[in-house]
Image: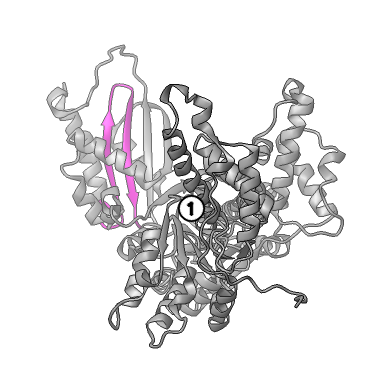
Amino acid sequence: MRFYRINVFLNNEDDEFEDRIPARRNVPNWREAQNYLAICDNISDSIVDRGFLFLSSASNYQQVLGLIIRNNLNEDKIVSRYLKESKLDYERLDIKETTFSDLERILNTAERYEFIEDTTDIYREYDLEDLLRRGLRGYGFNFEEKIIKERKKESIYLSANSYFANESFLPELDRIYAGRNKKAYGHPVDYMIESDNERTQQGVSQLLLQALYDVGRIENLRYSEFELKPDMSFPIKIVKTLYKSCAGGAVIVSIGNKEEDDEDIASGEYYYLEDFCKIVRRHCRDVLTIICLPQECTNIRMLLYENLGNCTFVEIKEEAASDEGAISYLKEYAKNYKIRTDKMLFSSLEKGKEYFTPELNAIFDEWYSKKIKNTVYSQYKDIQGAKTLIKAKKPKGTAYEELESMIGLSSAKEVLNRALDSYKAQILYKDKGMPVEEFCNHMIFTGNPGTAKTTVARLFARILKDNNVLSKGHIVEVGRGDLVGKYVGWTAPTVQRKFKEARGGILFIDEAYSLVDDRGGLFGDEAINTIVQEMENNRSEVIVIFAGYPDKMESFLEKNPGLRSRIAHHIHFEDYNTEELCSIAEHIAKSKGLVLDDGAVERIRGIVDKARQQSDFGNGRYVRNLIEKARMAQNSRLMQLDYDSVTADDIKRICEEDIKEPVIGNTETKRRIGFAIA
């Protein structure tokens, strides 16, 4: 089916600017308008079911007509008949094949001028109603239409050499030009183009259509394009209508995404491919189909072949280039920008390494950016590029500063910085071929009480949000009681709700081993199995952190081997030594507006050094309690002094006498490696 816009430019020496036939109420000579409309009706009646000619608008200087051709009709003969019967005096005639969207505009103009009573009847007559934009609502589906730019054989072959597909593409061009026909007899083959480069997919498709039109294998200059996405609502009725409208022409369909994993996407996300293939089979004689796929998209390709029946596809695959081939491509690319190449461009190529088009384009783009700044526009050579600024940018946010200011925690800080660097690297090096992946950042925190496991988890959530790794940056803290249901069947939904609550943030499971530690029944096992499943399902949306004592966490992992493989980072929080604990005490005091004098620090050092030998020592928590009690002791001491004698420095200062050694309830000491002296 073909659509035409026909512009008739009239000879008219009259300088009047008013429309001759704009609409019935303004037409000065309605009989003349009726004459043109009657001619269109007579011609349409003579080609009924095969074509429709109509008047869209008219003035003293121009008439615009529309033409729909369903079968093999000659548009020139139809227009010549109209011109002969209308006896128009014209100086120029323009007949152009056009798109469906342009046909809509031409028909709407005709209806507005009352040259057509109701355009809906026309759409129904030619089975085009489903292609109207209102028919596409709710499907998330769209299509585009374009017009083939006519080219000759020599020009097509010249352009074909710029694509890395010569082993499969040039032989097909040879086959196309081996059999020129004046009449289209259908399509012996369709095409499958495999490339990760959109430019290659579009360029090869264009050249194929130009060659096929040049030899008469397709009749229409108009062709349609649309994309099939995973899990989309496939509008089977609209696609059927689109194929019908493209009879005599072509349809280009893009399927798949190079960033998706081919092993997963063909399993069910493209469930509608069977329906799509039925439409392709139904129209394989009258509509040429070009399917564009990513490279190595084996599963989708085989799924298509399983459902395409007797349709034959020629596969055109992008090839890799190395050495001279890569250099030639870069030189040709540089010609398009009218810029000279240099050694710096080619130095980026490794000898013997094979490159695909996207990689070479990235190499060229990086070189080109530096080239024009250093040579053409040297006044900008000292201005840093966006990538350099991203690379140099430090992690932001008060939470990051707070973590960095904390004593110790070197392992935690290292893991966090690696996660931030990985996120930054994907942004920086995506155009150099680095795959965009969903990082698994699930973690285990092991350590004794008071080693800042919970504090660090809370800071991690804020830091990852501040640096755009997490979308929300909140933390959901849970224990066994929050995950294990009271009755059979309650546990899995409870765990799933917690994961849903934690999306965009961190799910912090404290004392995770309590789910299965010294407890009978299946509820804990069900919780762990559900957690493992949800960790995989939400790996890009939720970071899970398991926390607890080192020995018990190891036993916990041994009971659940599937869990260990899903955890990317194991951070052990070491016990603080005496000097670190003294620094922590000073840090806590400072955060409260207090200052420890030398005597207070020495007193804390002695107390802490002794307390560290106890099995239940609380690390930072112990020191925090020590400072809280010192503050209370200081308050009591100040209350014994004369009010007027107390200075601001007195209020800030914690003295040695304010530091009280806690009463130790459990005197069991930690086991130490070595020999005991009797």
Identity, as a three-letter code, of the amino acid under mark 1: Arg
Determine the residue located farthest toward the left in the rendered image: 25
Quadrant of the rendering where the N terminus is positioned: bottom left
Q: Magenta stretch: give its range.
A: 46-70
Judged from the image, the secondary structure of the residue bearing numbered disc 1 is helix
Residue 242, how many percent across, how many down?
36, 58
Q: Is any atom of residue 427 visible in this view?
A: no
Residue 507, how many percent across, how many down?
45, 62
Question: Front-most of 457 and 405?
Answer: 405
Residue pictured at 43% horizontal, 26% vertical: 642
Callout count: 1
Residue pictured at 30% horizontal, 48% vertical: 133
Determine the residue located farthest toward the top in the rendered image: 15
Report the side of 250 relative to 451 (left or right). Answer: left
Asked whether residue 30 is drawn in magenta, I would say no
Report the side of 273 relative to 120 (left or right). Answer: right
Residue 478, how many percent across, how many down?
40, 65
Residue 658, how many percent across, how many down?
53, 43
Name the colouring of the figure. one colour
Report the side of 261 relative to 383 (left or right). Answer: left
Residue pictured at 62% horizontal, 47% vertical: 603
Quadrant of the rendering where the C terminus is positioned: bottom right
Report the side of 468 relative to 418 (left or right). Answer: left
Question: Front-most of 535 and 325?
Answer: 535
Relative to 274, say whether 180 is above or below. Answer: above
Residue at mark 1? 458
Relative to 424, say whether 63 is above or below. Answer: above
Q: Which quadrant of the structure image shows residue 176?
A: bottom right
Q: Is any atom of residue 353 visible in this view?
A: yes
Relative to 145, say whether 89 is above or below. Answer: above
Q: Residues within 10 Å of mark 1 (few under 14, many from 20)?
A: many
